[in-house]
Amino acid sequence: MKRGMTALIVTLFFTFTVSLGAEETVSSLDLISHGDAAYKKFDNKAALEFFKKALETDPKNYEAAWKSARAYVDVGEKLSDARERRSYYEKGYFCLAYFLFVSFM
């Protein structure tokens, strides 16, 4: 009886600690889907964050690259500070260039 209880406790402990260490992974397609939903709500900053994470998750994802480029420009258009706006435009340009590179390589 003690061995059975000890084995059960060890098994539960092991299962619990392994599940705590497991990280949920989100696919780039899921992230793009979340970004699209945010974009439809005109929440361009949130959309940009989702598209950037999708690109980090899958650097060869051309959809994440061009949607990041579009979102950078959309966010930049709302900025009043010219330097900050230019920075967003440049990042958008970089994402667009990356999109072209990924698409044709």
Image (cartoon, helix red, strand yellow):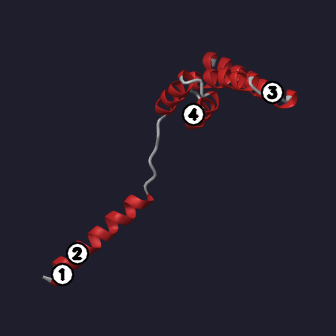
Tell me, yes or no, whether the two marked residues, 1 and 3, touch with CB atoms within 8 Å: no
Q: Earlier in the sequence, mark 2 or mark 3?
A: 2
What is the distance, in whole Å, between disc 1 and disc 3 at their CAs?
Answer: 67 Å
Question: Badge 4, how many Cα within 10 Å: few under 14, some, many 20+?
Answer: many
Give the vertical position of 4 relative to 18 (above or below): below
Estimate the x, y position of residue 61 in percent, counting from the top left.
56, 26
Count the numbered circles shown. Answer: 4
* Amino acid type, label 4: Phe
Of 85 and 30, which appears nearest the observer? 85
| Residue carrying label 3 | 85
SS assignment at label 3: helix
- Image depth: mark 4 or mark 1 in front: 4
SS assignment at label 2: helix
| Residue carrying label 4 | 50
Tell me, yes or no, whether the two marked residues, 2 and 4, touch with CB atoms within 8 Å: no
- Image depth: mark 3 or mark 4 in front: 3
Q: Earlier in the sequence, mark 2 or mark 4?
A: 2
* Amino acid type, label 2: Ala
Q: Earlier in the sequence, mark 1 or mark 3?
A: 1
Estimate the x, y position of residue 40 in percent, counting from the top left.
53, 21
What is the distance, in whole Å, between disc 2 and disc 4 at their CAs?
Answer: 44 Å
* Amino acid type, label 1: Arg
What is the distance, in whole Å, between disc 2 and disc 1 at their CAs?
Answer: 6 Å
What is the distance, in whole Å, between disc 2 and disc 3 at their CAs?
Answer: 61 Å
